[in-house]
Amino acid sequence: MDLYTVADAESVVARARSGDEGALEELYRAFEIPVYNLARRICRTTEDAEDVLQETFFEVCRSIGRYREEGSLWGWVRTIAASKALMRLRRNKYRETDELRDEVTGHRREDTALRMDLEAALERLSETSRAVVWLHDVEGYTHEEIAGMMGKTPSFSKSQLARAHHRLRRWLGEEVEI
Amino acid sequence: MTHLSMETLLGLRESGVEPGEAAAREHLECCAGCRAELERLHQRVARLKALPALRPARDRWPRVAERVRAERRQRRLRAGGLVGLAAAASIALAVALGGPARPAGAAGEQEIQLQMARSQALESALNQYHPDERVLDGRTAGIAEALEDRIARVDRELEMAELEEQQTRDQQLLKLWRERVGLLDALVDVHVTRASNVGL
């Protein structure tokens, strides 16, 4: 996703670097929805996602002078957003999801032939699994990049993704005997 | 027949060559079940990508902008404090030495330093009222915001003026520092008057 042409991006970044608040707001308006969407897919609550949105753009405003224009502007903003969302996730680690509680208590609700829609199934994944699914399958990060952002190994990212797809397949009723 | 694991199927979607990929592809050729599984995986990812974008319920830009402004104010205050102290020290030294008349052009420089010191004093005075922690009525907040915007513009012009030739630079700096002092004076008035009115 690139919301700006290279020339437009250079112009708005130059104005933002000189402290032009209008240019900073322009950046916010351009990337508000994709940043919120990424944050909301990773974070458990809308409150957390809105906080991530706010933190991301505060960081963008502070660091715009350090943006090197080597990759796309969206790529740079997205990496800040992903880091902030993962930071929030680590902070809220004490909050376990239904999925994890089920495992601990031995309940196997997924065996009751549930058929969820994709939104609900995604929401039901653990926060870590959901983050890996979203960053890898939708945002296109590699396992190495995800591992770097999460402070884990690429193998961890791969196994989280495989577990998540196992669960999604079951919850979506896609499991077939082969 | 042992079917391919989810991890192997996912590995087949990667652009790099995963260990055991050749054998996995060979298995796919002869296993309709695994081909179907891979196809479902592709479809699931496509559906994930097609999920509608979620939108924030509230506009968070005002909060971001307010934090950016507050940080800039703090930065200016810190910079102004250092510049003001240096200016005040140099003026005090000149007075103490009571030295010979300064060369032409120095008067302008001294006037700039005086304006810088006033600017710093006004910022310190403003800071005493902790403007970021106070709730203003809509009209007052609008006036304060307009003044802060103008101060920010003057600060940007000051940065630009520093790069100009000596002669033009001094005139421009003096003009801008005077303007900054005037704006800060007005901003202090806005906050202090309001604080007095409501007995804060």
Image (cartoon, rainbow, N blue to C red):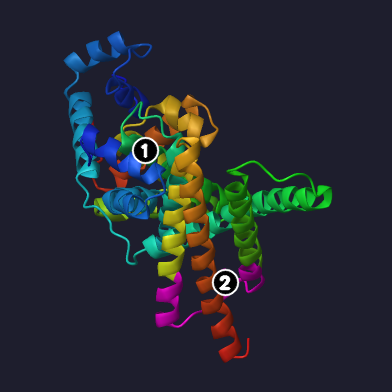
Label 1 sits on a secondary structure element that is helix
Horizontal and vertical percent position of residue B30: 18, 15
Q: Which residue is mark 2?
A: B131
Q: Quadrant of the C terminus of chain B?
A: bottom right
A92 shown above or below B99 = below
Q: Chain of mark 2?
A: B
Residue at (35% x, 47% y) in the render: A38
Image quadrant of residue B198?
bottom right
- Contact, mark 2 vs mark 1 (Cβ under 8 Å): no
Image quadrant of residue B195?
bottom right
Tell me which amino acid carries mark 1.
Leu
Q: Mark on residue A120?
A: none
Q: Is disc 1 on the same chain as disc 2? A: no
Residue at (56% x, 69% y) in the render: B132
| Magenta span: chief secondary structure | helix
Specify few, some or many for label 2: CA neighbours under 10 Å numbering under 14, 14-19, or 20 or more: some
Residue A113 seen in the figure: no
Q: Which residue is mark 1?
A: A135
The magenta stretch spans residue B130: yes
Q: Quadrant of the N terminus of chain B?
A: top left
The magenta stretch spans residue B31: no
Label 2 sits on a secondary structure element that is helix
